[in-house]
Structures are given as C-alpha cells and as structure tokens.
Image: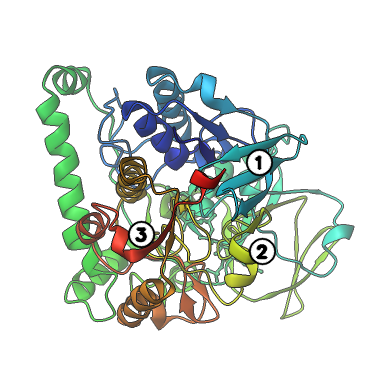
Amino acid sequence: MQRVGIIGSGFGGLCMGIQLKQAGIEDFTIFERADSVGGTWRANTYPGAECDIPTSLYSYSFERYDWPCKWSHQQVIRDYLEHCTDAYGLRPHLRLGTTVVRAEFKERSGDWIVTCDDGSIHAFDVLVSATGQLSRPKIPEIAGQRRFEGVSFHSAEWDHGHDLRGRHVAVIGSGASAAQFVPEIAKDADKVTIFQRTPNWMVPKRDREYTDWQKTLARRIPLLAKSRRARVWLQSDILAFELMRKESRLRPLATKGALTYLRTISDPDKRRALTPDYPMGAKRILFTDTFYEAVEEHDVDIVTTPITSITPTGVRCADGTTHDADTIIYGTGFHTNDFLTPMRVTGRGGRSLADEWSDGAEAYLGITASGFPNLFFLYGPNTNLGHTSIVLMLEAQVRYVLSALDQLSATGIDWIDVRPEVQRRYNDELQARLAETAWTTIEDSWYLQNGKVTNNWPGRTTEYRRRTNRCDLTDYAVKRAKAAR
Ligand code: NAP
C-alpha cells in the first residue's frame, strides 16, 4: 500500500490525484496552502486574466467541458478545475489552507516526513511536488518604494477593493500578465503609464465565442472535440515550436506578421517603444486582441527609461522625469528559478534541495533529482514550454509517476533514486540542445538563471511524452528499506 503526498492543487496536483484514483490508489493527500484548488488559476484574478493557449488543449485530455470561448478566462478555467475536483472525488483528499514547510527523507524507514505550518506531521512513501513555476509573486526592490503614498500591489495579488476609476496608474513590467490587465484597467483609469524594460512580440489571438450549436456538437460528438484538440496540438508542436529555435526558417514570416499587427498603433513613438530588438521566440510570444487597441484608444503611455526610484507620488526615471501615480501595479512576474523554495526539502544524508539547486535547478526528465528518492516533480526544472500547453507535459509526468508506483508495488522495491550519472548525462544533453534555442539569444528572462536555461524543455511535447512514457528502473538505484521496519 503506497501512501502518496501531493503538494499543490493546480493543474498538476489535481491531475496526479485523479490518476491515482483511476489507478485504484486511495491513500493520498493533496496539500494546498490556499483555501481552494486551482493553483495559478485561483491566484491570478487580475482583470483580463485568461489563458494564452486555446482551451481545447489547455485542459485535461480525459475531461471535456463546455468551453464558452476558444481561449478561456481565468474564472472559466478555475470552474473547470473545481468541476474536475468534484467529478473525480478529490475533495476528501484535500487539505486546504495547509502549507507544507518541510519535507524530509528518512533513509532508514524510506519515509518522507512532511511538516505543515499547522504543526501537523505526515509520513508518505512517495512525495509529489506540484507547486508550479509561477506561484511566488516577485516585487523588485526599488529605492523609495516604502514611502509611496498611494496603493500598490502585484498582479497576482490584485487589490479588488481599490477602485481604479479616475486613477493615474503606473504599471511596472510589461509581460504576459500586464498585456492582459492593461487593456482592462485602461478603460477605467484616467491614465496608465507602463514602465517597460523589454518589449514583447505580440500576435493577434482572434478569440471567439463558441456558438450554442458548436457546443452541442462538441458535446454530442466527442470526436469533434478531440480533433479540435489534436489540431491545436499539431499546429503548436510543429509551427510554434519552430520559433523556439535559434535559427528558424519560420521566424522572418512570423516577425513580418507581428510587425504588421504592431502597425495598428498609429503613434510612431509608441510603435518604436513596443518594437522588440531580439528574435521572436526568445521570450514568451504574447497572444492578445486588446493590448495594442488599448494603447491606441486610451491614455496609455510607454516609458522605456529605466526607473531609478519611487517617490511618495510617482515613479522617477533615469532621465530625471517623475511620472505622477496614485497606484502602482507590479506586473513583474514570479520567482521562477528557485522552484520549491521556501519549502525546506532534505534528501539522503540530509542534503538540501535548495543547496543542490543553488547554481540552477536540474532534474532527470524534470521529474526526479538524485539524492531525493521517491520524490517526483510535476512541472519541475526544464519542463516549461514556450510554444504549447503545459497540461501535455503534466499528463506525461503523472503517467511517469504512476509507472514508477506500479513497478514499486509489483517488485517490492521501496524506493528509487535516480543515478547521478543518468541525471548528469541527461542535463548535459539538455543544455547542449538549449544552447541552440532562441532563449539563449537574450541576456535575461525568467527562463534563465546565470545564463543557464533552467525552466524550459528544448524539444517538442511528442518527444517528451515518448521519453517519459515509462519509468525505466535501470535509470535508478533501488532500495528495499522497509522490509526491515
Ligand atoms: P513576466 O513575463 O516575467 O514579466 C515580468 C515583467 O516585469 C517583464 O516585463 C519584466 O521585464 C518586468 N520586470 C521584472 N523585474 C523588473 C524590474 N526590476 N524593473 C522593471 N521591470 C521589471 O511575468 P508575467 O507577465 O506575470 O508572466 C509570467 C509568465 O506567466 C508568462 O511568461 C506566462 O508563462 C505566464 N502567464 C501566462 C498567462 C496565460 O495566458 N496562460 C497569462 C499571464 C502569465 P523584462 O522583460 O525586461 O525582464
């Protein structure tokens, strides 16, 4: 009987729970620090929050849904995850409002001992981390920040009680989140000033609502929904993937298309400010139907001069200008490189995961790390994608974990620990391939740590799924520890 602990109840953690149940494993607990499930889709409630991957693919392959639009809004995805939680009977397994602060592997017993912030302590045979890569908001330290007299908050901690009507809003950062909330807040605010460090490549999303008959057809003919999913998958894994390469034959054409879209902005200064000077694909390409429109139609300014400080009433830049603001919204992203931190994870011989990963996180297939037996990561190092749905990767990882569990119970092995040389070889291969991607053509992005790509997978999802199809125990050192208990 395997006792499984899962940390996090976003797409990954819920998928793990569902598939454990489907496999007949009932002894599992999902720890969630928040009071409800949904992960990033619970946390990010900023106006305009939506998915930049079509929902037919940004959803579980095994659970269809009546999607209202081609691309879904945050609340719709959150509802879907709540629906899955009920449909697969996960509620009794949830421990909501409980933060795991420590996870410690006991070599003698082979147990993972998990300590929570409420003081409770739990023992598991297998621990699955599903904490996501984008769960800890990052607010940069800027001189004078604390003296600001207005209201400030991060996009992932939106202050819904703060009415933006008539406000002068400073938006720091211009990534995927800002591109979604700026068009919404620009409708209410008197003025929005975006402080942009790096412009983004943007392409039109062309979102549309599904008509009632389209929804009915998809409900009645499951093959239709499946073929829609397959089409989006193929398009992204073949075409969009091309743009992730350093040398891409598709890039000139895609760049031309994006620049044509940019020309919908009439002000040449704004257009210039929003024109990227790096290869398309080096950072996340943003899909939007509304951002350029908002810049064109509302009082939205783009400031590209670096910020030097925050004054009590605004934001000061390196050229000496101060831009008045009564509200500052940080669209400055997340702590993406330190993965499970601040949770303290210790493995064999008391080694600390944070120390092991201090120069850049790495794992075998993004799922296991040497010295940390029976610990599995979902959406771990080098499994993020720039071109298609992360749910494809999560499902592959969950299948891999199940394959491991299956073999553990079939063979009487108590724990497995990936061989260091296997992990080394895999990561050497990965880094050599990552050097050929567009992500290494720029100095900084959330994919990089000290110049090393720690977050992204360099291949197509088809390759990843093939390589994770089955857990090969020859990659692992195995131990039958509990027989002695
Ligand atoms: P982000 O893409 O990391 O963008 C952060 C922004 O803040 C960037 O413009 C960055 O500039 C800027 N910034 C960071 N530190 C700064 C500083 N000290 N001073 C000035 N500017 C600073 O974060 P995000 O927009 O929250 O998105 C993160 C990721 O979440 C996305 O890449 C995407 O994967 C995911 N996301 C997905 C969706 C979706 O539709 N599924 C929606 C939102 C977010 P630089 O570019 O120069 O670093």
Q: Is residue 392 left or right of residue 127?
A: left
Residue 206 location in percent, x, y? 28, 44
In this view of the protein, can residue 30 be seen by the observer? yes
Q: Earlier in the sequence, mark 3 or mark 2?
A: 2
Q: Is residue 99 above or below residue 436?
A: above
Quarter of the image that includes the N terminus:
top left
Q: Is residue 23 left or right of residue 10?
A: left
Kindly tell me whether mark 3's CB lies below 8 Å from ligand 1: no
Residue 408 location in percent, x, y? 36, 45
Q: CA distance from mark 3 to mark 1?
A: 26 Å
Q: Amino acid at mark 1?
A: Trp
Q: Which residue is mark 3?
A: 385
Q: Is residue 284 above or below residue 393?
A: below
Q: Which residue is mark 2?
A: 350
Q: Mark 1 falls on what kind of element?
A: loop
In this view of the protein, can residue 279 be seen by the observer? no
Q: Earlier in the sequence, mark 2 or mark 1?
A: 1
Q: Amino acid at mark 3?
A: Leu
Q: Earlier in the sequence, mark 3 or mark 1?
A: 1
Q: CA distance from mark 2 to mark 1?
A: 39 Å
Q: Mark 2 falls on what kind of element?
A: helix
Q: Which residue is mark 1?
A: 158
What colour scheme has been applied to the protein in the rendered image? Answer: rainbow
